[in-house]
Structure formats: C-alpha cells, structure tokens
C-alpha cells in the first residue's frame, strides 16, 4: 500500500494517513511524512527525525494517488501456502525441543490395589501429564512396570544420540517457502537468498519482471496528477527511469563512446547513467575521430 501526495511542486510518500472511503472518490486526511536522517536538511522542521503533518484533505487523482495490492489470488495463495509450511515449522520445532531431552525410568514400590475405573482414570491422567512433560520439560521421568523395588534408569544417553538435530532443516524449509513466494512475484529466489556472489543477471531479471511494472504504475499515477487527460490527449507523456544504480566510474569507457559518437544527446547519456539533466544537455557531441571532414566537432 502506498500513498503519494503532492504539496506544491514536491511529492511525498505518506508514512501515516487515514482513508475516507467514498463512491465519489476516496480522500485522505491525517497525512504525516517522516524524513530520513540523511535528508534532514531538506525537512520542513528541525530534528534528527523531522516530521511534517499536512492539515488538509487530499483527493485521489487530484493531488494524490493511492496504490494497493488488490491481487486477491496472490494473497489467498500465499496465505494457504503459509498454512501448510507453518504446520511443518511447528513439527520441526516440536521435534527439536525433544532433542537431547533427559528421560529416565523410575520405579516406586506400590502395595495398594486400585479398582478398574480408578485405574483407567489414573492412566488417562498419566498419559496427559506425560505428554505435557515430554513436550515442555527438559527432564522427564517415566514410571516403569517393575514395582517390586525402587530403581532409576536414565535412557537419554542411549536414545538421544539417535535423534536427528533438525536445526538445519529450518533454513531449508524457509528457503523453499521464500523461493515459492519470490518466484510468484517474478523475483529470482537466488537474489533474495544471496546464494551467489555475482547477482547482476538475477538483479536485471528482477528489475525487468517486478520493479519496472511497479514503476509503470507509479508513472501512471504521476501522469494522472501532472498531465491529466487533456495533456495526454495532445501527446504529453511521463516516463520513469533510473531503476538500477550504475557506477559511472565502471562504465566510463561506454559513456565516453556513446556520448562522443554523436548518436545520443548529452542528457540522454546522463539519464542512462541515473544523473539529472543539465540546461544545455539536449544536444549532440561528436569528437574529432568520429567527425567527417568539414563538419563541426560540436552540433547543437
């Protein structure tokens, strides 16, 4: 869920807001924006975590736009998927709690005899108590059948060693669940799990299949506020770029070649490098080695 508001020539992502539902169009009040510590110099008030409260009503499609994940199919699938994996997690946790549990048989002589009904009642209570003890207590004593003498026989040393330590299974099960959800959203699981050192291809795939579609939705929202139908009908459009951070020092050779060959404009090169445009950047530049005889080096 995301609410983007317009305040003058600035756009903000709301951290808190109240939605007022209406058939004529939703409105939003109580809008608050929190500024990060790195942008405190641009904040409207001072403080390490500056905050701005807008005491006004924002109208959907006029001075704000609201995005919400309305894919009910994905929500239902993820919820049902977690129900299944949650049960498996619970089984692993229950088994892990019993790994290394100290269990011992203990015999206490009993001379009194019990009636059948009383014996059945005690057996039920015994079974319930023993189950609770084995699930929750680190030390469990199990009554033995031998009632002729007192004895104590610890069985943890011989039996606990055969129980499998299932801590590693938690991560394996978690990886499977994360991979299911990531693949459903178009994000490579290896990128989320960080399994490979070089994730550039996975990052490109995630940007192409997941990030850019969201960016297009944002562009449509901005266009509805800034350009509107009248501007769009005459050819005005809005495009969002800069989805991937590019280190211009690593791409210096490519930037130099594409910029100096006169194929693209200066601002187009800056846009591809995630840099803002400059006032005189809508022009072509061609270096001397690409230039034909008699043609100026720089064309505007």
Image (spheres, rainbow, N blue to C red):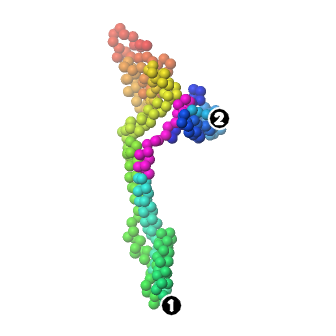
Q: Is residue 277 visible?
A: no
Measuring from the top left, give residue 56's x and y in whole percent: 63, 33
Crowdedness of circle 1 by 10 Å Cα count: few (<14), some, many (20+)?
few
Q: Is residue 69 magenta?
A: yes
SS of the residue under disc 2: loop
Q: Is residue 296 above or below residue 274?
A: above
Measuring from the top left, give residue 84's x and y in whole percent: 41, 56
Instruction: From the viewer's perspective, tell me whether residue 275 is left or right of residue 22.
Output: left
Query: Which residue in the protein does label 1 denote?
Result: 112
Say whether marks 1 and 2 touch (CB < 8 Å).
Answer: no
Q: Residue at x 49, y 86 (%)?
A: 108
Tell me which segment is drawn in magenta: 60-79
SS of the residue under disc 1: loop
Q: Is residue 52 above or below residue 157?
A: above
Query: Which residue in the protein does label 2 denote?
Result: 55
Farthest front residue? 23
Q: Residue at x 38, y 36 (%)?
A: 208
Q: Quadrant of residue 197?
A: top left
Measuring from the top left, give residue 116's x and y in whole percent: 46, 86
* Image quarter hosting the C terminus: top left
Farthest left residue? 292
Q: Is residue 230 magenta?
A: no
Q: Residue at x 48, y 87 (%)?
A: 115
Q: Is residue 178 above or below residue 139?
A: above
């Amino acid at each position: 869920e995301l609410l983007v508001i317009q305040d003058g020539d600035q756009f903000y992502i709301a951290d808190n807001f109240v939605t007022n539902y209406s058939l004529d169009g939703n409105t939003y009040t109580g809008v608050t924006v929190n500024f990060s510590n790195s942008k405190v110099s641009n904040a409207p008030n001072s403080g390490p975590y500056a905050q701005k409260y807008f005491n006004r009503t924002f109208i959907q499609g006029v001075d704000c736009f609201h995005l919400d994940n309305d894919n009910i199919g994905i929500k239902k699938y993820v919820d049902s998927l977690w129900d299944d994996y949650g049960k498996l997690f619970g089984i692993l946790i229950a088994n892990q709690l019993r790994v290394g549990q100290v269990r011992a048989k203990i015999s206490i002589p009993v001379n009194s005899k019990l009636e059948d009904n009383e014996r059945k009642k005690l057996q039920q209570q015994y079974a319930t108590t023993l189950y609770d003890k084995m699930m929750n207590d680190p030390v469990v004593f199990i009554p033995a059948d031998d009632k002729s003498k007192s004895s104590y026989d610890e069985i943890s040393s011989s039996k606990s060693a055969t129980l499998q330590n299932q801590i590693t299974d938690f991560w394996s099960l978690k990886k499977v669940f994360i991979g299911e959800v990531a693949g459903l959203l178009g994000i490579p699981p290896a990128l989320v799990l960080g399994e490979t050192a070089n994730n550039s291809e996975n990052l490109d795939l995630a940007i192409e299949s997941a990030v850019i579609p969201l960016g297009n939705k944002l562009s449509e929202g901005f266009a509805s506020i800034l350009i509107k139908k009248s501007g769009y009908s005459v050819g005005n459009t809005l495009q969002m770029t800069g989805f991937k951070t590019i280190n211009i020092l690593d791409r210096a050779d490519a930037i130099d070649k594409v910029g100096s060959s006169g194929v693209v404009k200066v601002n187009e090169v800056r846009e591809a490098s995630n840099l803002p445009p400059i006032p005189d950047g809508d022009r072509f530049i061609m270096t001397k080695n690409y230039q034909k005889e008699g043609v100026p080096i720089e064309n505007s």
